[in-house]
Amino acid sequence: MRGMREIDRGEQVEPGRVRRSGGGRKLATSTDPELEVALEQLVEPVSRSDPESPLRWTCKSTRVLAKELAVGGYPASDWLVRQIL
């Protein structure tokens, strides 16, 4: 309904967009910058591979990492952990 009202009022949107920019949920790393650092501290001791390589291997699953983050006070899902890694 809101979109229909915007069309009726003749509001302009950017080409290729349905809504104005800036909406939606903010990134978890922007609302809590320490989250990425905490995850890095969990992954670093058990990571395998060349440190210069963008590909990192770890013995811990994303679910285990998410649980460890939650214990440390950073509630995160395994999906979020995958996105950050």
Image (cartoon, grey):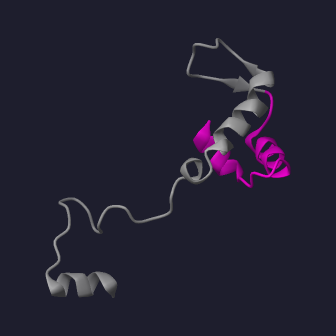
Q: Which of 26 and 19 is in front in this view?
A: 26
Closer to the camera, 79 or 12? 12
Q: Outermost residue, left direction?
A: 10
Q: Is the magenta stretch mostly helix, strand or loop?
A: helix
In the displayed structure, does residue 32 sit left or right of residue 48? left
From the viewer's perspective, tell me whether residue 77 is left or right of residue 84: right
Q: Which residue lies furthest to the right in this view?
A: 71
Q: In this view, does 65 lie to the left or right of 29?
A: right
Q: Residue at x 70, y 24 (%)?
A: 57
User: Looking at the rendering, in which quadrant would you find the N terminus?
Assistant: bottom left
Residue 83 x %, y % = 58, 43
Any magenta on residue 73?
A: yes
Would you place residue 7 above or below residue 77 in this image? below
Q: Position of residue 68 (x, y in %)?
A: 83, 44
- Residue at 74% x, 24% y is 44
At a point 20% along the width and 62% down the height, the residue shown is 14
Q: Where is residue 46 in the image (x, y as percent from the top left)?
A: 80, 23
Percent x, y for residue 26? Answer: 50, 58
Front residue of 60/25: it is: 25
Quarter of the image where one finds residue 61: top right
Q: Quadrant of residue 75?
A: bottom right
Q: Is residue 66 above or below residue 20?
A: above
Compared across the picture, whether 22 is left or right of 61 comes to left
Q: Indicate the quadrant containing the C terminus: top left, top right, bottom left or bottom right.
A: top right
Q: Please give the range of residues in magenta.
A: 59-85
Q: In the image, what residue occupies the spot 80% across and 28% down?
A: 59
Quick check: is 53 in the magenta stretch? no
Looking at the image, residue 72 lies above or below residue 5? above
Q: Is residue 54 above or below residue 77?
A: above
